[in-house]
Structures are given as structure tokens and as C-alpha cells.
Image (tube, grey):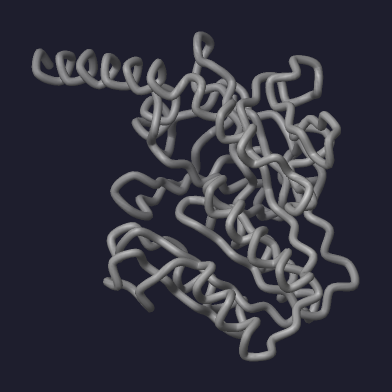
Amino acid sequence: MFPIVAKRCLNPTVTQMVVHAPRVAAKAQPGQFVILRVDDAGERIPLTVADYDRQAGTVTVIFQIVGVTTEKLNRLNPGDALRDFVGPLGRPTETDGLKKVAVVGGGVGCAIAYPVAKKLHRQGCEVHSIVGFRNRELVILEEEFKAVSDRYVLMSDDGSAGQKGLVTDALRALLAAGEQYDEVIAIGPLIMMKFVCALTKEWGVKTVVSMNPIMIDGTGMCGGCRLSVGGETKFACVDGPDFDGHLVDFDEAMERGGMYRATERAAHEHLCRLLKGEEDHA
């Protein structure tokens, strides 16, 4: 069992949780992920390592409440424990030799982008962080990003936080102003990463994206996380999750990613009704 030692609500649908998992904390690197189960009957879900403390033996994960498992996970509190917490899995984000990088995060993807920006900052890299959200209410990790960024640009769809517009608007403005990056690292919704890559391809800037497709075992055996990259089949859990964004078939990934959306939504709604019934009878 893996005890939950801290929990924080980052916005109405996103939660940060710190889990005591010393063996995972000892090896974890930015870009890697864990697979957890809430209980014996629970499904396995992948969550990216948002931070870690090797001395304390803890790993931080950040998740959005979108389905049955994340709803159950969000109902746990410090003092409760997870049944399984396996990792670190996947390949760490490669940061060696980078001198100037634009880290682009969208929505809850900022939870994955932050540890990468933090590592780059610690290595002495100049970090420009561009993060985007639909509105002010959904903004997460603002102060954390500012602490590890030489330049921090906050965008929102409605203009209620930072500048109004998309992350691609901000990135295009920086490139047009003469900023030259060794690499752009984009992490967020597939559609966001697709358009970031289309932009950076115009400018000839290497771009790395973090892919989080449907995943089950996390060891490359099930094949559920397959992607087409440069015309070849890759598995996000063992070959990634980071890939050359200019080679990823985003349209295929988006089609596969939406396969179970309606089923998951229905299951989530059913669980919420059951839980509400239990509360009403308590």
C-alpha cells in the first residue's frame, strides 16, 4: 500500500496528490510516469510524475477528474492509501546540452510541463514558459512556473488571465521577435500539440511532444498505447512518452484517444449517482 501524505485542489477539476513511494521517488525523472490502482478492483491508469522528493520518499501526481478512477482517486485523502503505485515508467525527457528552450503547456498538461521546466532551469538553461488555459479559474502552477522561468507567458481563451489568445499566438510572437530556441517542448491536449508542431515546422525549430494515449500495462506488452511516428508504430510506454512532434500522426492519435470517451463519461455519471445516493442515505 502507498499512503497519501498530502492533497491540494488546484482548480475545480484538477487535484495534486503527494504519495509516499520511496522506491519510485529514488529513480523518478521528469517526463516519466507511474501506473496506479486505487483499490483491488480498480483499473490501472497512468499519471505523469509532476514532482518528487528523494529524501522524503514521495512522488507528486496531478490529475484531472474525468472518469471513474479519477473520481474515486479524488475522494481519497491524506491517511488513505493506494493499492498499487508502479514506476517510474517510460523514458525521461532529454535535456542535456539544451541552452534555451520554450516549454509550452496547455491545461492539465502544465502538470507535466512544469517538472521539465524545473529540471532545465536547474541545469542553467534559459527557459521560456508559455502556458494556456480556457480561463482564470482553471490556471494551475502559476507561481511554480514563474520560479523556474526566465520568461513566463500566460494565455487564456477568454482573456481573464494573462493575454487573450492561444499558446501558438504567444509562441509565434516570440519567434517573430527573433527568439531562437534549441528546442520547443510542448505538452497538453493533442490538438494543441498538433498546432504547435505545425508552427515550429514553419520556423524549423525542433519540437518534442509528450504523448499520453490509452495505456494499460505500461510495459509494451498490451499495445494499447501505440502511435504512428514517422510512419512507424511506436509504443508510448516504452519508446516514449516523448517523441519528435514533427513525426507524430496526431490525427490518428486523436481518433484513437476518443474511442472510449462516451463509455467513460457514462460510467463516470453512473458512479457519481451511486455515490450521491450513498451520501443522501448516510
Return the x and y of residue 33 as percentages of the image width and height: 68, 40
In front here: 46 or 226?
Answer: 226
In front here: 18 or 32?
Answer: 32
Depicted 260 relative to depicted 210: above or below: above
Q: From this viewpoint, is residue 54 visible?
A: no
Q: Quadrant of the C terminus?
A: top left
**How many numbered tags mark residues here?**
0
Return the x and y of residue 117 as percentages of the image width and height: 66, 68
Return the x and y of residue 7 as percentages of the image width and height: 42, 46
Return the x and y of residue 78 as percentages of the image width and height: 42, 39
Depicted 107 relative to depicted 153: above or below: above
Q: Quadrant of the N terminus?
A: top right
- What residue is at 75 percent from the left and 83 percent from the top? 180
- What residue is at 75 percent from the left and 78 percent from the top? 181
In front here: 194 or 90?
Answer: 194
Question: Is 248 displayed left or right of 250 in the figure?
Answer: right
Q: Quadrant of residue 277?
A: top left
Q: In which quarter of the image is residue 171?
A: bottom right
Which residue is at the far bottom? 177
Q: In which quarter of the image is residue 22?
A: top right
- What residue is at 62 percent from the left and 54 percent from the top? 51
Question: Is 156 displayed left or right of 176 in the figure?
Answer: left
Which residue is at the far top? 41
